[in-house]
Image (cartoon, rainbow, N blue to C red):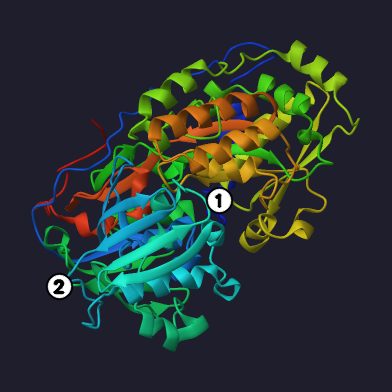
Amino acid sequence: MPAPRTTPPRTAVTLAAALSALVTLSACTSGAGSPSGPSTSAPKLTATTPAATGALDQVTWNLPMGEPTTLDPAKVGDYSPSTVVSNLCDPLLRLRADYSLAPGLATSWNRPDPKTLVLNLREGVRFWNGTPMTADDVVASLLRQRDPATQSVNIAVMAGVTSITATGTHQVTVRFRAPDQLFPKYLANGFGAVSEAAYLRKAGSSYGTAKGGLMCTGPFRLTSWRSGESITALRNGAYWDAALRPKAEKLTFRFITDSSTLTSALLSGQIDGSYELPSTVAKALRSSRTGTVYYGPSAQTVFLYPTGTASPLADRRIADALSLVLDRDALIRNVYDGAAQKPKTFIPSLVWKNSEAADVYAKAHDALPALPAVDEARARKLVEQAAPRQRTLTVAMGAGDQQSLQILTFLQAAAKRIGLEVVIKQLQPTQMSGLFYDPSAREGLDATMVLGYVEIPDPLSYAEMLTAPESPLNWTRYRNAEVTALLRQAKATLDPGRSAALFTRAQALYAQDLSLVPLAWPHERMFLNKRLSGAPASFAYINMPWAAHLGGTGDSGTGSRTGEAGS
């Protein structure tokens, strides 16, 4: 099951730029007043870019979150590895740019009874080595994720599964202890990716590494991985989906994490494109004649989360106090350059916006309490009422993550005015990752900045992680028997409308007592060199073969498409 994500370091653009941004942000709110300063209009959003028309010899793409540690689909659950693997290893279901589901390696699926799921597999699909894909490969790919030795990030998805068997050459049947409406949706991410069974056995624990490689069915095939330098994939000319046979012959991934270096590389054309642009880079590229900055809908979420029961933030009154002194309009204008939304909850609306029960989710979201206006007097009273009396919060963030630093510095100044001290602690990537799985790594910390995203089109998947008593990410030991019961019923209810109604009842309850501070829903930010087009601009790229959509525009001159793009 995907966890809230934290990013590896993004080196600050320059100390001067960082100080300037912080001064600007801090100046945006004074006392309990409203934000001041120049207005930044919200960018227009587009889920896709204009369809590509021509072939490309090669595309060089950047991973601003750094080099992946693995490309094993079972272990992939973060920005960099998912950006690569989504073009290499096809899942059973496919995520569309609008965050809806479509057939993938499974052409259809049905439930002969509530506890049985039958997957009908696509015929004529071959792995890169020419071997036909069969039901045995699907069974092996799914079952290995139940083995603790695999270290699958989705092991919890298998908790209710009693068996997965091949019931035909191109049919797989999954049986459950209880109905599970979430399971099919997980088949659209790394959990549902199919690898060749024979190759898995041969590679063992080295599968997905630079040494062990991969054997999948995707539109690009992995050809080299030079640690610290690049990952290269070549076009799969025999790809089963003729409409998505890549127009690019070669796809090379680089790992530039420094914002100023990335800006220069994109401006010069050394790098053709990148998702997850830091806002400083997006702003610098907005008037570029080299290409276009696209803003798309996103399933990303940023919030402040307590690390344990002893944290002052575990007291809902402290969380509410911080929320009352947090000027989110100023944050979005100055930190995100307008490319974000104010959140009522920690689950972005894109997750349910295109579901069958979208109207149920929308009505419930509208009914949630509005975010409070800045009110220092009320916040100060909540702090005085809170227990225990500890008034210092040590907050972890990824070293070099300029956006998180700006947010926390702003929050630090506001918190001081209501009697709270925020201490910012920057951690290296391995330390930040360890927070989510190793309780000892959270010692001495009171909270962390979570830069998360919801991988599948269902809000239940993310809500469970923070509220279920047995969840390893429920650090505050949150307990609400009614919330737990409603979410379990929602998971076991196969009717979309009824499941959504149960979830939203739970949401209304945990919105009142779950202790965290929602900060923003950032938009997706992508840059494309003017010679390229076709790539999806929405966050759905994280689990779809986005590079297979890339192609040429037929424009190799200067100044063809510039500035921001949207619809």
- Report whether residue 38 is seen: no
Q: Position of residue 306 (x, y in %)?
A: 73, 40
Q: Position of residue 353 (x, y in %)?
A: 36, 31
Within-10-Å neighbours for mark 1: few <14, some 14–19, many 20+? many
In percent of the image, x 17 and y 63: which residue is there?
A: 246
Q: Position of residue 85 (x, y in %)?
A: 37, 65
Name the disc covering residue 237, or none. Answer: 2
In percent of the image, x 42 and y 79: which residue is there?
A: 226
Residue type, label 1? Arg
Name the disc covering residue 95, or none. Answer: none
Residue type, label 2? Gly
* Position of 278 relative to 71 (above/below): above
* Position of 49 relative to 183 (above/below): above
Counting residues from the start of the chain, the first of labels 2 and 1 encountered is: 1
Quadrant holding the C terminus? top left
* Position of 267 relative to 26 (above/below): below
Helix, strand or loop under label 2: loop
In the rendered structure, the answer to whether residue 257 lies left or right of residue 293 reads right
Report, in whole angstroms, how far the alpha carbon at label 2 lies from the one at label 1.
Answer: 34 Å
In which quadrant of the rendered view does residue 312 lie?
top right
**Does the residue at mark 2 contact the one at mark 1 (Cβ under 8 Å)?**
no
Question: Among all residues in the image, which is located at the extreme bottom?
Answer: 202
Which is nearer the eye, 531 or 488? 488
The residue labelled by disc 1 is: 5
In the rendered structure, the answer to whether residue 273 lies left or right of residue 8 reads left
Q: Position of residue 531 (x, y in %)?
A: 17, 53
In percent of the image, x 51 and y 63: which residue is there?
A: 162
Question: Among all residues in the image, which is located at the extreme right?
Answer: 389
In the rendered structure, the answer to whether residue 185 lies left or right of residue 70 reads left
In percent of the image, x 88 and y 28: which residue is there?
A: 387
